[in-house]
Amino acid sequence: FLPRPHHPPRETPDHEFPLVLTTGRLYAHWHTLTRTGKSPKLNQREPHPFVEVHPDDAVELGLREGQLAELTSRRGVLRLPVRLNPGLSRGLIFVPFHWGDQHGEATAANYLTISAIGRIAKQPEFKYCAVRLAPAHDALAPEPPYARTRQADRPIRRIVAEASVPSNLATTSRSRTS
């Protein structure tokens, strides 16, 4: 291995987008749910996307656990329920990427991420982009997401009900400029 010089992120927080978004995996799911999304037990554990925020940041932003929040970047907007996580650094926001467009645009974390790629490895910069987070006051209530069985291609709405999915889970809009 050859050490490479550090390059700062292409997009950094500013007055309009003061927080940093990072995306990642959850232990109950793998990539885009193509396998784990077919497991009722795994879907029951993590049935829907969310936005994680440090409790102190949530207080400053007027957010509480379970509340629907609007997460905005220069590329798009998601509306997701809030989870408080004291393990996050202040100013850092986390959204899992698993749901993609499978359950609607409201769950596609990468609509917010930047399309910049690394200069050498050409890897996308999915782990760092500037965002703002605020309470969502005008959220719509879409059909809740649900799992499908392998044996019968019919919804299993019981799983969603047992998991207590917020009825006003998410709506989104996206604006792609790149």
Image: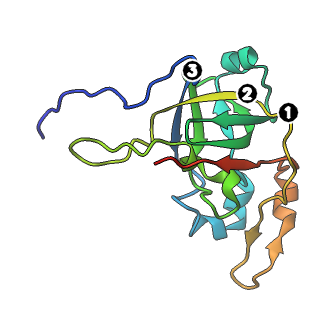
Q: CA distance from mark 2 to mark 1?
A: 9 Å
On residue 30, the disc is none
Quarter the N terminus occupies: top left
- Toward the front, the furthest residue is 177
Between disc 2 and disc 3, whose residue precedes? 3
Determine the CA span between mark 2 and mark 3.
12 Å
Is 127 on the left or on the right of 46, as rendered?
left
Q: Which residue does the numbered mark 1 point to in the structure image?
A: 137
Kindly tell me whether residue 9 is visible in this rendering.
Answer: yes
Residue shown at the point (58%, 35%) measured from the top left:
73
Q: Is residue 59 above or below residue 37?
A: above
Q: Position of residue 145 (x, y in %)?
A: 77, 60
Between 61 and 172, the one lying in front of the other is 172
Which residue is at 85% across, 33% downward? 137
Q: CA distance from mark 3 to mark 1?
A: 20 Å
Number of residue marks: 3
Dot 3 lies on which element?
loop
* Relative image position of residue 39 (x, y in whole percent): 67, 68
Mark seen at residue 134: 2
The image quarter in which residue 155 lies: bottom right
Of 151 and 175, the residue lying toward us: 175
- Horizontally, residue 102 falls left or right of residue 63, namely left
Query: Which colour assignment does the render follow?
Result: rainbow
Q: Earlier in the sequence, mark 3 or mark 1?
A: 3
Residue 26 in sight in this render: no
Dot 2: element:
strand
The amino acid type, in three-letter code, at marker 3 is Pro
User: Which SS class for mark 1?
Assistant: loop
Q: Position of residue 51 (x, y in %)?
A: 67, 37
Q: Residue 18: which disc?
A: 3
Foreground residue, 171 or 102? 171
